[in-house]
Amino acid sequence: MIGRCGGLAERAAVRAHAIRRAALACVVATTAATALAACGSDSDSVTEPELRAECASSAATTTDGATIVRLRGFAFEPSTVRVAPGSTVLWVNCERSTVDPHTTTSDTQLWQSNSLPPGASFSHDFAQPGQFGYFCVPHPFMRGTVVVE
């Protein structure tokens, strides 16, 4: 009788382990599906940073001529850009997906992006000459300048 009970206990332990593994797999799959859905639900401009051509490239401009500023390592790269009047600046969050979102916010309220999660972008057209400082609201030590000349 003891041997039979021991066998039952062993089978029950194996079943319990299998149930825990199945539950964990379900949680992982659900979390991954939720994360993937969230990446594309806010805006068409949201993708994984490593999939964005602007993050992988070192080019200073896009194919349509916008000047690129990458948000990477809690900094704007480059921190200062020089553009002609009528130019567009495109900020792209190239941070890893584990990093909190950033913003690009004009010192003079000329523009204000929404929260930019990793992979998201924001653009602004600069019509008039001048020097325009900006920062990240959640990380105010992140500063940059657009010089329009």
Image (cartoon, rainbow, N blue to C red):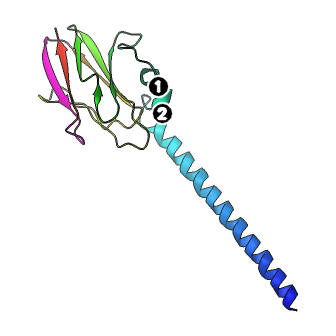
Residue at (73, 75) in percent of width and height: 13
- Quarter of the image with the N terminus is bottom right
The answer to whether residue 116 is above or below residue 79 is below
Calculate the distance from the C-alpha at mark 1 to the C-alpha at mark 2.
7 Å
Q: Three-letter amino acid code at disc 2? A: Glu
Q: In terms of secondary structure, what is the magenta stretch mainly?
A: loop
The answer to whether residue 3 is above or below residue 127 is below
* Nearest to the observer: residue 4 or residue 103: 4
List x then y, in percent, for residue 128. 15, 12
Asked if residue 97 lies in the magenta stretch, the reply is: no
- Quarter of the image with the C terminus is top left
Q: Secondary structure at mark 1?
A: loop
Name the residue that disc number 1 marks.
Answer: 52
Asked if residue 130 lies in the magenta stretch, the reply is: yes
Name the residue that disc number 2 marks.
Answer: 48
Residue at (24, 41) in percent of width and height: 139
List x then y, in percent, for residue 79. 24, 24
List x then y, in percent, for residue 76. 28, 28
Q: Which residues are magenta?
A: 127-141
Q: Secondary structure at mark 2?
A: loop
Instruction: Say left or right for 101 vs 137.
Output: right
* Nearest to the observer: residue 19 or residue 34: 19
Instruction: Say left or right for 131 vs 18.
Output: left
Q: Are marks 1 and 2 in contact (CB under 8 Å)?
A: yes
Mark 2 nearby-residue class (10 Å; few <14, some 14–19, many ≥20):
many
Q: Three-letter amino acid code at disc 1? A: Arg
Residue at (14, 30) in percent of width and height: 109
List x then y, in percent, for residue 53. 47, 21
Instruction: Say left or right for 15 vs 105.
Output: right
Q: Quadrant of residue 131?
A: top left
Q: Quadrant of residue 71?
A: top left
Q: Quadrant of residue 24?
A: bottom right
